[in-house]
Image (tube, rainbow, N blue to C red):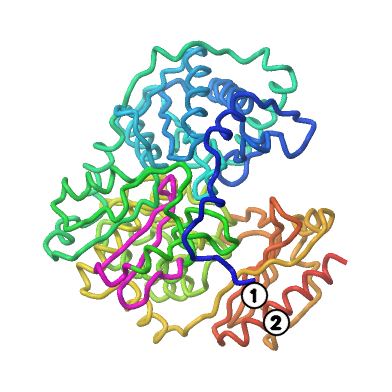
Amino acid sequence: MTSRAGTPAQSSDLIDVEALIDAYWHRHPDVSDPEQKVVFGTSGHRGSSLKTAFNDDHIAAITQAIVEYRAEQGTTGPLFIGRDTHALSAPAQSTALEVLVANGVDVLVDEFDGYTPTPAVSHAIIRYNREHPGQPQADGIVVTPSHNPPADGGFKYNPPHGGPADSDATNWIAERANALIAGGLQDVQRAEATAVGTYDFRTRYVEDLGSIIDMQAIKDSGIRIGADPLGGASVSYWQAIAEAYGLDLTVVNPEVDPQWGFMTLDWDEKIRMDPSSPSAMASVVARAGDYDILTGNDADADRHGIVTPDAGLMNPNHYLAVAIQYLFTHRPGWSEDAAVGKTLVSSSMIDRVAESIGRTLVEVPVGFKWFVPGLIDGSVAFGGEESAGASFLKQDGTSWTTDKDGILLCLLASEIRAVTGRSPSELYRELTERFGDPAYARVDAAATKAQKAALGKLDGDAVAATELAGEPIVAKLSKAPGNGAAIGGVKVVSEDAWFAARPSGTEDVYKIYAESFKGPDDLKAVQAEAKRIVDAALG
């Protein structure tokens, strides 16, 4: 059967929004069932109401747990809350507001009752705390499952540093929330959400963009920019940016549809708003020739997709390498000691770029939360991950966001085009001429739950192999070099190749990320050997 990936969604692919919202209010989870418990992944609790994994009970309990956690931490300032365009986001925000108001939290929602990108919430937290030193600190909640399919909901907490909460916080919140649900929600306070303040997220975010992006250069260049929000929370932001800075910028598709019926199907024939996926971005890529730079964002705008006329959709690793090369040579206000941050499954091209510009590389486990300390104190000027998420410092070297900012990275592509006269994809080809042209891919391998658990705790020393695709192994890592944190898997490195293996959090597989600077054939050899090495280590 021919795959429908990259083809327009059909009516049979669309969710029943009414049924989804009805399930949110009327289904009640059994937290003795692991599938119905509150579980925080790298970006909050996610699930579908139709699977009794994201319902009113969950959000009431999580919000009450956040209230108790922030009180324990001494966080007594305002709480900024924003939501994206998923169908479950509005009811979840409604639930959260009832709990926050009942608990006396000073909560601020969007002034226009609109959609709020994740980076706008992070930016608001950081800006407030910077402008109110010595006063009670602000924090935030973002109601979003990011790029997940339309039937999903998501809910994440950002402490006063503005970025994703760390594992200590999320484990505490999840454990308390599950206890509250198991107790029949008796300790959850709720009240009509009438005493709610407002905040103009959009204006404050847009007006500050000039402090981090050379907006004048973009305007002066006259380049044609297309921005596709993919039906997400950035929709009104792009129009506001165009108007505020006088850019030749077109919002390619301003439609907001909780069914996302205008999307093309992702690789697995599901609707998924992933701007780094060639299948999900097929309709956007088809218009590549209409603009000098064409971009996409996911539903909460924390991810970016960069489309150029000469190359179509850029691989996220390629764009990160170009962004780092450009920024560290065009930001004189940054400290000479500020480092480059990357997740350990991102391309080694970044390592070679960082070395060439004389910058320290900070390699951390998967998850943007690991970049937060460095982005806050300025010791890391850029943090990026292979899944098309990144942020960086303002031109004066201070923090902008400590969460991923897809709008920012899209605008950076336009700055790069305006300042250099070349597209990011052209600049990446120049990097390959200097450093080699790596082949990179991620594949899945079957694994039992026991094997996944073992892989998550695997020590690098348990890897018996001494060679990887014919090259001597130079490192066997179970902890990230940049901060010593556990990888939750293993990474094996040779001079010209590497692989990393991590268990999936949702499926009975483990993920193999691999890269080779010797080309696609060597990459296949690395992938095959990676599976043998991991299987042998797992017994």
Q: Give x and y (percent) for residue 516.
A: 58, 81
In the image, is residue 172 above or below residue 244? above
The CA distance from mark 2 to mark 1 is 8 Å
Q: Which residues are magenta?
A: 287-316
Neighbour tally class for label 1: few under 14, some 14-19, many 20 plus, Cα within 10 Å: many
Please state if 468 lies on the left or on the right of 341 as rendered: right
Q: For the residue marked with disc 1, what is the amino acid?
A: Val
Q: Give x and y (percent) for residue 11.
A: 51, 51
Mark 2 or mark 1, which has the lower sequence index?
2
Q: Please indicate, yes or no, whether residue 12 appears anywhere in the rendered image.
A: yes
SS type, badge 1: strand
Magenta residue check for 304: yes
Magenta residue check for 265: no
Tell whether label 1 touches label 2 (CB within 8 Å).
Answer: yes
Q: For the residue marked with disc 2, what is the amino acid?
A: Leu
Q: Give x and y (percent) for residue 125.
A: 38, 34
The residue at which mark 2 appears reads as: 468
Neighbour tally class for label 2: few under 14, some 14-19, many 20 plus, Cα within 10 Å: many
Residue at 60% over, 61% down: 268
- On residue 493, the disc is 1
In the image, is residue 397 above or below residue 135? below
User: In this orientation, which residue lies closer to the viewer: 420 or 449?
Assistant: 449
Please state if 467 lies on the left or on the right of 16 as rendered: right
User: In this orientation, which residue lies closer to the viewer: 471 or 15?
Assistant: 15
Q: Give x and y (percent) for residue 407.
A: 34, 52
Q: Please indicate, yes or no, whether residue 370 appears anywhere in the rendered image.
A: no
Residue at 35% over, 75% down: 425
Image quarter in which the N terminus is found: bottom right
User: In this orientation, which residue lies closer to the viewer: 329 or 147?
Assistant: 147
Image quarter in which the C terminus is found: bottom right
